[in-house]
Image (cartoon, rainbow, N blue to C red):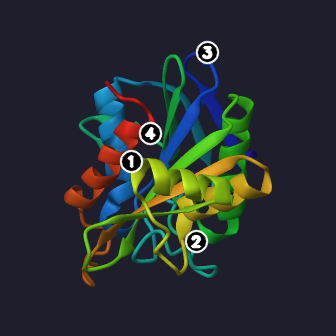
Amino acid sequence: MKNEIWLETKKPIDLKDPIAVVGSPGLGSIGKLVVDELIEKSKAELTTNLYSTHFPVVYHTKPAYLAHYALPGIGGVKVEKQKWGLPKVKFFTKTPSLILVNGYHANFAGAYEIAEKVVDILQNFGVKRIIITAGFGSKENKVCCAATNLNLIHEMKEKYNVETEYQGPFYGFCGLVFGAAKLKGIEAISLFAGVEPKLGDPEFLAKDSATMIVDILKQMLDFS
């Protein structure tokens, strides 16, 4: 395996001005829960897989989204019910205009490269707006946002009553996708749902927090 990143196209993509929603495991697994629910509700189809030698099957770090430069993780495949598969980022599409990205955390050495590649793929698909979903540590059950320009901030406040309240680091796959989108001139909005961390299990399933983001996305994406 010489290539560090490669793609598998399972189905051609033909979308009109698509919007992308991105999520990955993280605090409360909120981003992954959001994307998984949208895939189920929209019946989106898996169209592209992104593989990389930077994806460990077992992480040395806990939580997994805090990649450490000296701890690259352990390579391998995932085996479940007589099936196996390499770790991957999965792109699901729903015509006419929705892309859902189920992310995967790379090791430290490849994290920036993976994020840039994901944004390049979305840009090639014609995406001009990316919505990124994640969690932040809080005792309040509320959603706040960050965005790549002030117009998006005003839009979130005026249309959806979502404020910019979180301040601090945005770790891992989704944080880097947010940064790469800004550098490449693509509009990006991050929706953060508040969740109280569990020190012994930072990637527990915070389903109620994920549902808060899904409810806002239903409005933003005009789900019917």
Q: What residue is rendered at 34% in x and 23% in y?
A: 43
- Considering the numbered disc 1 on the image, is that residue within a helix, a strand or a loop? strand
Question: Between disc 3 and disc 2, whose residue precedes?
Answer: 3
83 left or right, relative to 182: left
Callouts 2 and 1 close, C-beta under 8 Å: no
Question: Between disc 1 and disc 4, whose residue precedes?
Answer: 1
- Name the amino acid, label 1: Lys
User: Total of numbered circles in the picture?
Assistant: 4
116 left or right, relative to 67: right
Q: Height in image: 13 above or below 148?
A: above
Task: Decide if residue 41 is in sight here.
Answer: yes
Which residue matches tag 3? 12
- Identify the image quadrant of residue 141: bottom left
- Identify the image quadrant of residue 173: bottom right
Nearest to the observer: residue 192 or residue 47:
192
Question: Between disc 4 and disc 2, whose residue precedes?
Answer: 2
Disc 3 from disc 2: Cα separation: 33 Å
Which residue matches tag 2? 72
Which residue matches tag 1? 78
Q: Quadrant of the N terminus?
A: top right
Name the mark on residue 220: 4
Disc 2 from disc 1: Cα separation: 17 Å
